[in-house]
Amino acid sequence: MPPVTSPSVLAVDLGTTGVRAAIIRLDGTTVDEAHVACAYDRPSEGWAEIDPRRWWVATKSVLAALFPTQDPRAIASIAVTGQAPTAALVTSDGTPTYPAILWLDTRAAEEASELHEPSYYLGPKLKWLARHQPDALRRAAVVAQSHSYIAHALTGAWSIDPSTAALSRPLWDPDARAWKKDMCASIGINPALLPRIVESHHILGHVTKTAAEQTGLAEGTPVVAGGGDFAASALGAGVTDPGEACLMLGTAGNLLLPTSHFGRSPSLIHSHHVGVPCALSIGGTLAGGALEWFRSTMAPHASFEELEAKASNVDLQKSELLFIPYLAGERTPIWNAHATGAFVGLRLEHDLAHLYRAVLESVALSFMHMAEIAKAEGHAVQNVVAANGAGKSALLRQLLSDALAAPLSYRPTGGGTLVGGAVLAALGSGLTSDPKAAAYWSRAMCEHSPRTEHTAIFSAKLKRRISIYESYESITTR
């Protein structure tokens, strides 16, 4: 790798199963990048937890791969982003009093029902801790998020940014952008456990001498507060304005819509964006994971390219086959961890091509469902930027453009969480004042225009799918 040339920034991302870091120049060029696995534990069904100290061990390993082969003095600033929400109970020096409960953990189902919130959010997790681990809660000084735990390890300062604080329902007031102290008391936690609010692109502190010795970073390097990986992904795609949408098409798929006002529909996730003063409405579903499940199960010797070529010959107007993609339950918009998948409408004439086409269409229909809910709140999708692995499928991209009734641009390279973190770091250190910087870093795009006649077909299919799910869901959950 070439040596770092200033100005450059460092972005670190705490994912659900690993830690990544990249040194990125202010023209969007990635100088060097590293990844270290950091798997979570599943001690019981529905549980997902980790000792947060393992995040720091993995982060140090990632940085060891970048420094000292690169000059740490050339790093102008650092941003850390991460999975959210997490309930990491720690003492003031970062020592955990209980394993961190991750976003996908569903142990707090009973508490979630009592609070009328999905177990995904932080509030039910904390109520579960108050009920089942009161001593761990009593000994804790802070409830940390994944990225804030690492930011503290680097700077010695605790904080939370609005993008992750908003996922603390029902403890967060999105209008006041402050904690609801009375709600904290009602679920049995001390409001003092919740960190101070620092905007994601504001300087939180500087790399301490101890952190520098452990990581190879330069002492005194500024560190911004950072934020949720989901919001950083949208920022990394250059999606910052209402009317725009970002489609992250990884194993899981996310539709991220910057909005002029905070959303209220319980069917979607609502948060604050990072780096810009607007809100963010989010929908999540299985995307690439559904495609990989189909290929590995139904056609293990076929490539995705071969499957797509076959599926491209299926006429959308003549195909009534539907796939319900709830292979791992579903978050938005149905919030049913026990939902299951199904092929509906199978006939003798259906073959592998029809089945794969139905799986592709199911992803597009899921995002269409989310977009319709957002539109009902006044947040219409006008154009879409897609990124990540599943976006390599030209057929899927066209189906998404048709279903969302909006032009879609795909960026084969660039974008993503680390690029969003780089923008946050650059904003915080004054290297740029433009939160849309990432939009100019990756210009190579594939463009798709919606086909009106296909949008109408998708709309009819979505209505049919909702009706079918409601019918069989009542049977499968008895």
Image (cartoon, rainbow, N blue to C red):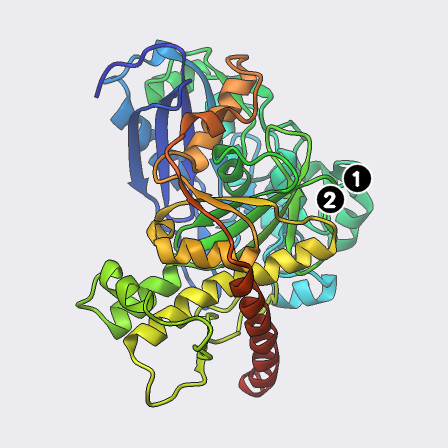
Contact, mark 2 vs mark 1 (Cβ under 8 Å): yes
Q: How many marks?
A: 2
Q: Between residues 469 and 137, which one lies in front from this camera angle?
A: 469
Residue type at tag 2: Phe
Mark 2 to mark 1: distance in Å? 8 Å
Residue at figure coordinates x 66%, y 63% from the top left: 112
Q: Which mark is residue 175?
A: 1
Picture layout, residue 320 above or below residue 405: below
Q: Foreground: 436 or 149? A: 436
Indicate the position of residue 9 as horizontal and vertical percent values. 42, 19
Which residue was labeled with disc 2?
262
> Relative to 430, is 216 on the left or the right?
left
Q: Is residue 408 left or right of residue 272?
A: left
Looking at the picture, how far across and down is residue 80, in whole percent?
A: 47, 30
Circle 2 or circle 1, nearest the eye:
2
The residue under the point 23% across, 71% down is 299
The answer to whether any part of residue 395 appears in the image is: yes
Q: Residues within 10 Å of mark 2 (few under 14, many from 20)?
A: some
Q: Please determine whether, in this image, residue 288 is positioned above or below residue 384.
A: below
Q: Residue at x 30, y 37 (%)?
A: 35
Q: Nearer the viewer, residue 417 or 152?
A: 417
Residue at 59 percent across and 57 percent down: it is: 120
How far across and down, in percent of the image, does residue 256 sit? 57, 46
Q: Quadrant of residue 273?
A: top right
Under circle 1, the secondary element is loop
Residue 135 x/y as whole percent: 61, 50
